[in-house]
Amino acid sequence: MADLFLGSPFRRFLWGPTVLREWQGSSVGALDWIETPSSHLLKFNVPGYGKDQIKIQLEEDNVLSIRGEGFGGKEEQLPKDSVWHVSERGKGEFARQIVLPESVRADQIKAQVENGVLTIVLPKEPAPAKPKTRAIPVSSKL
């Protein structure tokens, strides 16, 4: 019964390894996880990051690690006597890990960053064909 309510992939949010790890102060955080009949789509907000600043790696066969390295935007050159009053945009680094469902075809994962959104496509294995209904003869001896 618990698997119906907390089944894969959501059960891991409560009992599994750390599925979500995010550095405090990061401007990255919002995640959309959409499942279609043929794939899982992960969408992350990554404002200011380019494709060269994002590293995606598959670890331990089913843990997807996403890291943003370097400052998200170009650092401004401020005069020496500048005073920071508020700093809410973070360090410009982030890290997240997601445990993937078993049905993902790891060799076909694709990623794209565009307009501040990182989209990762996780193709799924085709569902096994259901056996056709057929009559099974009954005999008196096996």
Image (cartoon, helix red, strand yellow):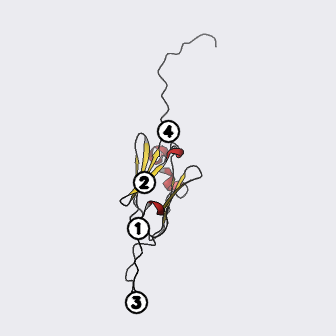
Q: Nearer the viewer, residue 131 or 59?
A: 59
* Tag in front: 3 or 4: 3
Estimate the spatial distance between the alpha carbons at disc 2 and disc 4, rounded to whole Å.
21 Å
* Tag in front: 3 or 1: 3
First along the sequence among labels 2 and 4: 2
Disc 2 residue crowd, few under 14, some 14–19, many 20+, Cα 10 Å: few
Estimate the spatial distance between the alpha carbons at disc 3 and disc 4, rounded to whole Å.
58 Å
Element under disc 4: loop
Please report the residue visible at 53 percent of the width from the left and 46 percent of the height from the top. 106
Q: Nearer the viewer, residue 8 or 34?
A: 34
Q: Amino acid at mark 1?
A: Ser
First along the sequence among labels 3 and 1: 1
Q: Are marks 1 and 2 in contact (CB under 8 Å)?
A: no
Q: Are marks 2 and 4 in contact (CB under 8 Å)?
A: no
Q: x, y percentage for residue 95?
A: 50, 63
Q: Which residue is mark 4?
A: 125
Q: x, y percentage for residue 62?
A: 55, 50
Q: Which residue is mark 3?
A: 81
Q: Amino acid at mark 2?
A: Gln
Q: Amino acid at mark 3?
A: Asp
Q: Are marks 1 and 4 in contact (CB under 8 Å)?
A: no
Estimate the spatial distance between the alpha carbons at disc 3 and disc 2, rounded to whole Å.
40 Å
Q: Which residue is mark 1?
A: 27
Q: Which residue is mark 2?
A: 112
Estimate the spatial distance between the alpha carbons at disc 1 and disc 4, rounded to whole Å.
33 Å
